[in-house]
Amino acid sequence: MSTAQGAGPAERQDAAGPALLQVEEVQAYYGLAHVLQGVSLTVQPGELVALLGRNGAGKTTTVKSIMGLVTVRGGHIRCEGRDFVGLPAESVAQFGVGYVPEDRRMFPGLTVRENFRLAGLGSRLPKAEQQAAIGRALQVFPQLEAHLDRDASRLSGGQQQMVAVGRALICGRKLLLVDEVTQGLAPNIAADMGATLRRIADEGHGVLLVEQNSQMALELADRVYVLDQGVVVHRGDAVALRRDPGWMERYLQL
Ligand SMILES: Nc1ncnc2c1ncn2[C@@H]1O[C@H](COP(=O)(O)OP(=O)(O)OP(=O)(O)O)[C@@H](O)[C@H]1O
């Protein structure tokens, strides 16, 4: 594995106490298929960390492992030092973790308001805090105010992604896991979503971003991990990769 110069994740953890998210040596399986083979990464508050790699490298599996949606048979997944490996997805929200799945998952017939209320219930926060969290999501996406009573599944792709990220923000008080949120969006809408995720991180959330547009992810990210065949093959600062014109060929074999 190559590691860019500067403090690596382990050093950052020592300096700053337990990481917001620490994935340590995770082994994940689909049936007998051993897909993640010792994946380790960290995310700190205020950081946007990009998880890159070719199709099938294991990015989605990493995020699903954190969310308790894949069988993990080894390693640790900690939020602020508390291990939650093996907990079901509905319990992971208690740790302040929100998830934007690859396929948006808009349930037909549910309005934007109902999507947000359901996310509030899923957060298991007291009712007043659920309302406050919904208010904060609408501050991030004020465009949705006008659509609160519309069927979310009938909104445009960009608006649906706002609903998906808004829902995740309601559950994810501390950390957002975002899988391919710009897929299928027009370039300007994708860029707006990227800028919004950067702002969310700047305001204190940790964000782990799986993104097919590696160039965009690199521009948004503080740090980057590259996966290949279920193994981290590179980790480092995004600034260093941005100065390296050959990085895509080297790490993504494009
Ligand atoms: N439900 C599943 N059952 C069995 N194998 C799976 C399943 N989902 C993914 N895989 C396999 O696990 C490996 C990692 O897939 P994963 O979806 O995590 O990759 P990825 O890096 O997110 O790729 P992509 O960019 O194509 O989404 C691949 O070999 C894939 O075929």
Image (cartoon, rainbow, N blue to C red):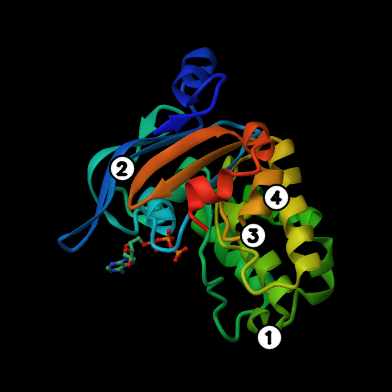
Give the camera-side residue of 162 and 167: 162
x%, y% of residue 120? 58, 58
Circles 1, 4 touching at the beta carbon (< 8 Å)? no
Instruction: Name the kind of residue labelled 1 in the image.
Output: Arg
Q: Earlier in the sequence, mark 1 or mark 4?
A: 1
For mark 4, give the secondary structure.
helix
Element marked by disc 2: loop
Q: Is residue 124 above or below residue 212?
A: above
Disc 4 marks which amino acid? Leu
Sooner in the amino-acid sequence: mark 3 or mark 2: 2
Which residue sits at x=79%, y=59%?
192
Per the image, the residue denoted by label 2 is 85
Q: Which percent across, then down, holds residue 99?
A: 52, 56
Q: Which residue is mark 1?
A: 154
Give the quadrant of residue 140: bottom right
Q: Quadrant of the N terminus?
A: top left
The residue nearer to you, when weighing 44 against 117, is 44
The residue under the point 39% across, 62% down is 56
- Quick check: marks 4 and 3 in contact, CB under 8 Å? yes
Contact between marks 2 and 4 (CB within 8 A): the answer is no
Give the residue at mark 3.
Answer: 165
Residue 197's tag is 4
